[in-house]
Image (spheres, rainbow, N blue to C red):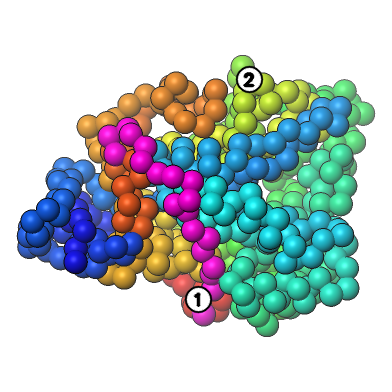
Amino acid sequence: MIDMVVRSDRVVTPQGVGYYDIAIQGERIAAVAAGGSLAPPAGVRLVDAMGKIVIPGGIDPHVHCAWHIPGPNGKVDMTADPAHVSRAALFGGTTTMIDFARWMHGSTIQGTIEARDKQWVGRCHTDFAYHLMVEGLLPVGLIDQVAEAIRAGYATVKIFTTDITPSRKGRMVGFGDIWEVFGMLAREGGLGVIHSEDNDIVMHMYEKLFREGRTGFENMAEVHNTLSEDLSFRRVIHLAEQMKAAIYMMHVSAATGVQAIRESRARGHAVYGETLHQYILHTSEDYKLPNGQIYHTYPSIKGKEDSDALWRGVDEGVIHSIATDELCCSLAIKTQGKRIDDTTGGNTGVEPRVALMYTEMVERRGHSLPKFVDLISSNAAKILGMYPRKGAIAPGSDADLTILDPALARTIRKEDLHEADYTPWEGYKVGVWPCMTTLRGKIMVEDGKFHGVESDGQYLKRKIAPEILAGKWP
């Protein structure tokens, strides 16, 4: 029995854009038929989305909810919880988020997952998943535990190649342990998701700038610099190639990172690139603006030549997804750090991401609607083991739909959003805004009204597709 039909002359499907009727039955899409061909039975709603754009729900593959925020003088705050962030995500047309389950010494991988479940299960409006995160010196037996988790549907493993700041010792995984993890990933069909910076270069630059008295956060791009990205990306990619491990390079920020991925993909290797909307739309000059910390995450924003290179990476299929590194906190917390070693990372952007990238990609740069959908939804689903359940408007897929309405074009204001008391996108004009978001067939947001409950979100167990592991896609 069909529960709802959505009709639009601009539906973005895996086959292209067209005039279609989408029939929803229960939680899934039952049919995608020629526009006007489905007559809803009596009592079944027809959503008239003519003149609007219907896309699969957005997927943000890089968020941090209920996450600790280290601040000056040892102070530690927490980011907003999954209920808060997922609500904002749905207002902005994002229906799936991937966070991190951080293993720490003294715990087990299973214990880590169970602890994260207590913060997420029954407390999230969107569907969700975790990247497993390991850190520091990996004890004997831990990699076997990770392998078991991959087999159980926890398909991605986060690794840092740097401690990020001098105060976060123990975050970086040694290169020998990375070698061992990559070997396990190749055997088990997992995917490495990598925060890749050269720790020697980064820590040297902290020391250098402190000696020179240039400690202000506006100098951040000198610390987390393009050379660091170049050296680290190439080292990690070369190791992954040798081990035949598939990797996903998180928050690519520099032209050097784009080039390293480009060269490896030209050799046929399974390496994929993610950037963030702040990297591709901001430059390090923005650190000099009032409250310039609001644009920062780790690694730093780089120069205009780097944002230009990221756009070329999008054009060429070297950058595959655009995430947020969501870290939802107040303006006071975001701007509490003033120095290169204590500035709060992450960004508040999960709500405006879809509209921002539509405006930049489709309206300002002439990308097709399918390309836009790939970057904010479909590619993340494919690479990270959720496709075609997620990221597609197709029979059998989850009925996750976002309807973008050009009539709702607006100037972004913090008062209109549902995340924090500030937005780094204040005053930014977008050409669309969602008028409806559905999650597995349930209308979660319609005409600015929220209809979700915290138990709506489900955990997504994932398996990486063979073509992704083999570097045969796209």
Which residue corresponds to the image point at 25% horizontal and 64% vertical from the top-left? 25
Position in image of residue 317 (x %, y %)? 46, 60
Left or right: 286, with 41 as reference point: right
What's under tag 1, amino acid-wise? Answer: Ala
Q: In this rendering, which labeled residue sits more in front, label 1 or label 2?
A: 1
Residue 16: give x, y in percent of width and height. 25, 62
Residue at (84% x, 43% y) in the render? 168
Q: Residue at x 37, y 53 (%)?
A: 439
Residue under numbered circle 2: 291
Q: How many marks?
A: 2
What is the C-alpha distance between the residues marked 1 and 2? 43 Å
When the figure is inspected, residue 186 is found, relative to residue 343, above or below; the finding is below
Give the image location of residue 249, x and y in percent.
62, 58
Disc 1 residue crowd, few under 14, some 14–19, many 20+, Cα 10 Å: some
Kindly identify the residue that appears in the image at 60 percent across and 62 percent down. 248
- Say whether residue 186 is left or right of residue 86: right
Q: Which corner quadrant of the image does residue 330 belong to?
A: top right
* Residue 459 in sight: yes
Q: Is residue 319 visible?
A: no
The foreground one among 430 and 55 is: 55
User: Considering the numbered disc 2 on the image, is that residue within a helix, a strand or a loop?
Assistant: loop
Q: Quadrant of the C terminus?
A: bottom left
Q: Main secondary structure of the magenta part?
A: loop
Residue position for label 1 = 465
Kind of residue indicated by mark 2: Asn
Vertical placement of residue 367 versus 213, above or below: below
Query: Is 267 inside the magenta-drawn segment?
Result: no
Q: Nearer the viewer, residue 118 or 426?
A: 118
Dot 1: what SS? Answer: loop
Query: Residue 430 in the image: x percent, y percent?
Result: 35, 32
Q: Which residues are magenta?
A: 446-466
